[in-house]
Amino acid sequence: MRFDLISIFPDYFTPLTLSLMGKAEDAGLVTLAAHDLRQWATGKHRSVDDTPYGGGAGMVMRADVWARALDDALATPLACENEEAATASCRRVLAIPTPSGTPLTQPVVEDLARADQIIVACGRYEGIDARVAQHYRAAGVEVLEFSIGDYVLNGGEVAAMVLTEAVARLLDGFMGNPDSLVEESHSGAGLLEYPVFTKPRDFRSLEIPEVLLGGNHAAIERWRRDRAIEKTVAVRPDLALSLDAAALSGDDRATLAACGVAYPRAGAAERLTVRQAELEDVVAVSELAARTFPDACPQDLPREAIDEHIATQLSADVFDSLISDPERHRLFVAEVWGGLVGYVLTHVGPDALPSDLVRPGRVDVGNAYLSKCYVDAAWRGSGIADVLLERAVADAAKAGHRAIVLGTNRGNKAAQAFYKKHGFRKRSTRTFDVGGVANYDVVMVRDLTPTGGATLA
Ligand code: SAM
């Protein structure tokens, strides 16, 4: 790839001959050509600027001088033009640094790495006469007006070097170890990089995370991914909301949701809040409950039985009395901008468990009861259920319970796998009445004691 960097201070580009960039040039991977704009200027003073039309402070760089420089740069013969392949056509990009340009992001840089020649026109003073970009665009040249950040520099040289290095390091053969590019910030899904550590192991009482000292590669990978997600949400929430959803696993989504960002099945990500329900949520929760309950029912359960259950067990009145008694009933809701999308209901306290669930030696009378955990269809797989469940479990533990119990339809294998992932184990069975029809549940229990010493079978 060829870079033509045009400036009134071409010496600015000397550092590009150092380090990996210098090596890449020696190896013929890149050609770096720095040009002095004044060689295309005329007159005794070889002036490149003049006063702005319309008045105002500062000087503007002249279009005629720039056009002579750019015509020459665009006419430079390139290696790709000598290729025999019929498709060989050179891609030349005219890049103009300006604080009012398109942000130079990694996707933009990745695209530029496929060009054959990049010409960078470095402005000074108040910038370059606007007709330069206008003229070359109209002439069919690919013009990119780019900014390296929301601040103003004295000239485009630093921006030109930023672009040159960011593009060149993506070229095949540039990096000694191309794997270095794979997990970097802004690559892949678009996450920032996880924190990295090296020797010495002891540094001013700060420790290396334990997982990195063991050889469990899957655990290390997961730890790094989770830290990358946390960092991205904390530092760049804008990026966290615009990740490549196709590159996110279920575990990624669960971590994102735990950090307050939820990715739906389709459509844009949203900020997520999980909070205790309040009385003004009564109608919204009962509607959500009515929407979500049928999905968890067996296919052969009559619709009338489901409707009966919704009318009697999931009404606004029922939720009103539950929310009104937070000492015994704990209701947490998941909320996005569009409204409530999930809820979890637990019963805590000495009489939390329904009596039909108590099985001496298997399910203790004093355990907490996880009654419901539901998420709207559009948001399933987004990690919201994971966040709701963990919130309810932590809440039950905080209330002093040694274990939490739930019943889920025995045919609903997905729900059982979900609860198993969260530490629940099958302990028993029960029948569960839905609108007068008996359904068969498996009863699952999660130990909440730090040592796993709850009295479970
Ligand atoms: N008057 C211009 C404006 O307000 O947008 C600023 C001109 S600046 C002083 C001079 C030159 O520095 C620009 O023409 C551009 O080449 C370069 N420059 C300054 N800030 C830049 C940034 N954030 N990104 C890219 N180039 C920048």
Image (cartoon, rainbow, N blue to C red):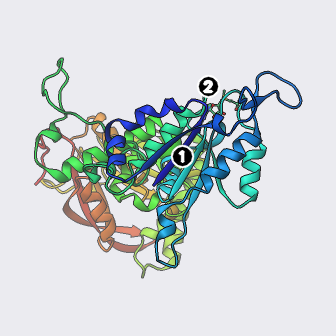
Query: Up-down: is 27 above or below 426?
Result: above
- The residue lying toward the viewer, choosing from 345 and 142, is 142
Compared to residue 263, the image places residue 273 above or below, namely: above
Q: Check disc 2 and report its element: helix, strand or loop.
A: loop
Q: Which percent across, then down, holds residue 55?
A: 87, 25
Residue at the bottom extreme of this rendering: 300
Q: Amino acid at mark 2?
A: Asn
Marks 2 and 1, how far apart at CA: 20 Å
Q: Residue 433, position in %: x, y?
A: 39, 68
Quarter where residue 38 is shown = top right
Residue 20 lies in quadrant: top left
Q: Write down the residue under mark 1.
A: 4
Task: Please state the horizontal and vertical placement of residue 333, each as a whole percent of the image.
Answer: 49, 46
Name which of mark 2 and mark 1 comes first in the sequence: 1
- Under mark 1, the amino acid is Asp
Q: Residue at x 67, y 40 (%)?
A: 40
Neighbourhood count class around disc 2 (C-alpha, 10 Å): few under 14, some 14–19, many 20 upward? few
State which quarter of the image contains the C terminus.
bottom left
In percent of the image, x 48 and y 34: which residue is there? Answer: 13
Is residue 86 visible from the viewing direction of this image? yes
Q: Residue furthest top?
A: 204
Residue 192: give x, y in percent of width and height. Answer: 40, 42
Circle number at residue 154: 2
Beta carbon at label 2 within 8 Å of ligand 1: yes
- Choose between 62 and 238: the one closer to the eye: 62
Check whether the beta carbons of the residues at disc 2 and disc 1 lie within 8 A of each other: no
| Residue pictured at 43% horizontal, 72% vertical | 436
Crowd rating for badge 1 (residues with CA inside 10 Å; few <14, some 14–19, many 20+): many
Of badges 2 and 1, nearer the viewer stands 1
